[in-house]
Image (tube, rainbow, N blue to C red):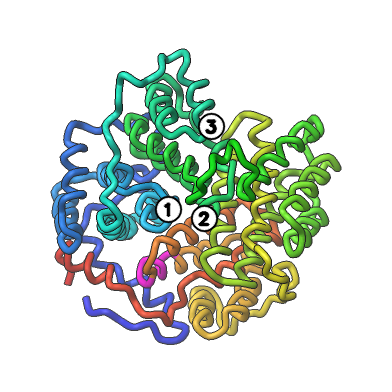
Amino acid sequence: MKRRTFLGHSAALTALGELGFLSRLPVVSAQEATVPTHMVRFDAEIEPLVRLLEETPRERVLEEFGSRIQRGLSYREVLAALMLAGVRSVQPRPVGFKFHAVLVVNSAHLASLASPDSDRWLPIFWALDQFKSSQAANVREGNWVMEPVEESKLPLAHAARQAFIDAMDNWDESAADAAIVSLVRHSSAHDLFELFTRYGVRDFRDIGHKAIYVANSFRTLEVIGWQHAEPVLRSLAYALLDRSGANVNPAQADLPADRPFRENQERLAKVRDGWTAGKMDGGATREVLQTLRAGSSSDASQLTLDLLNRGVSPQSLFEGCFDGAGEYLIQAPGIVSLHAMTFTNAVHYAWQRVRSDETRRLLLLQNAAFLPLYRGGRADNGVHIDQLEPVMPSTKGDEAVAEIFAEIGKDRLTAARKVLGYLKDRPDARAFSDAARRLVFMKGTNSHDYKFSSAVLEDYGQLSRPWRDQLLASSVFYFRGSGERDNELVERVRSAVGGS
């Protein structure tokens, strides 16, 4: 099939026909891509498959895996190989940059999960190529590999939990590595998620990637199977102890990256009983937005405490955080503001799943505290997400979606206002979301395209109006426009699977 170019408003529509060559691969059903009700057990071939991924040259990896997929290699086996190869042969420090090969595995999976059956392989092929790029960077930077477990150093099962807490509190890498191995062999996934969630939001080093890694690693393990937890959680513990070059032990110093956590320890006990049963309050959401525009980290935490004690629902506070992150993206599009969104996505995911009341309070306070740190010293420029006026697209239906994505290349603010107009009388944004994902597949060039799109499209469905529509409107400040150049991946995958 010959490539077609995107022209004007027809861009998102013609994109729908560009990936027909994927029909040569086995269809990935929604059931196969969805988290299983039981843990998936992989056979003895997973280690050779991981080695195959590690040892195949980048220029051949798509062809090699495309051939094996056509011969029966499953979606979950490929996803497991991606995760395990990443944690074994890409150093998780800093928690970002080359380590996005691991951070993005869950995002690629979410993109697959939300796609039509016929398209689900494309994000996975992209992740295979991303791994090879990160692996090469890891080799250039010293060729770090995860070392074998020293069994003689493992604490006894009954002492492993406290040993892990002590090691993490004291930033002791070797002790934490030994403790997590023992702990993972004797603990449930839920108990470990509760522990790691707390340390994921402990400090602001790596601009929120620590919390993102906590959420994404456990979400990936839900799909590939808990039997793979040991190396993944060893990598995670090592990542969470990254000091970002600090020469002093954070446990023995008062460093800016750790200050919000320490301040919020005092606020935790001040949250009223029954705080989770508050009422939705749009005025409170606007208070959060206003504070995030000019307030300090401490101001945002204190407001969160005050609103909870006034009986405001946590949902209203999260809606303020999500739209505040969206406003940062509108005012200063780029990598830093993007991570305000993906960090909030990770915190909200954890908040919905942890059971500890104290941890849930901590997540709310830390989310609010970290957001002004993404803003930094930048002044509010007056473009506010809750004051954007909708503009009706000049077309209807799918053509209106195409019009919006064509507008992104001309004027993103107008595109955002057209999103609001488009959503005005619509119960959902499925057509818009499908087009956004398809353009990421065809035009995305880095892991942030996948991380951001998977996060914001997931979060949209969990907010109430008008905040969800405003959040989606802000997304066009990072989404790919239909007029951008196609990436090379689609053509490479087409060639790898014998498309024409």
Residue plotted at (16% across, 47% down): 52
Image coords of residue 215 (percent x, y): 49, 43
At numbered mark 2, what does the secondary structure look like: helix, strand or loop? helix
The mark nearer the N terminus, 3 or 2, is 3
Q: Could you say whether the residue bearing mark 1 is in a helix, strand or loop?
A: helix
The percent coordinates of residue 260 (x first, y second) are 68, 46
Q: What element does badge 3 sit on?
A: loop
Closer to the eye: label 3 or 2: 3
Query: Residue drawn 80% across and 57% down?
Result: 287
Mark 3 belongs to which amino acid?
Asn
Q: What stretch is highlighted in magenta?
A: 437-443
Are circles 1 and 2 on residues that touch, CB within 8 Å?
yes
Depth check: give the residue in front, 37 or 108: 108
Q: Which amino acid lies under the numbered mark 2 shown in the image of this protein?
A: Ala
Magenta region, mostly helix, strand or loop? helix
Q: Kindly identify which numbered label has been placed on residue 107.
A: 1
Residue closest to the eye, 143 or 382: 143
Kindly report the distance in space between the C-alpha atoms of the residues bearing marks 1 and 2: 8 Å
Which of the numbered marks, if any, corresponds to residue 455? 2
Q: Nearer the viewer, residue 168 or 63?
A: 168
Position of residue 275 measured from the top left corner of the image (x, y, whole percent): 77, 35
Looking at the image, is mark 3 or mark 1 earlier in the sequence?
A: 1
Q: Which residue is drawn at 67% across and 60% down?
A: 323
| Residue 114 visible within the image | no
Q: Name the residue under label 3.
A: 170
Residue 223 picture quarter: top left
Cα separation, mark 3 vs mark 2, equals: 32 Å
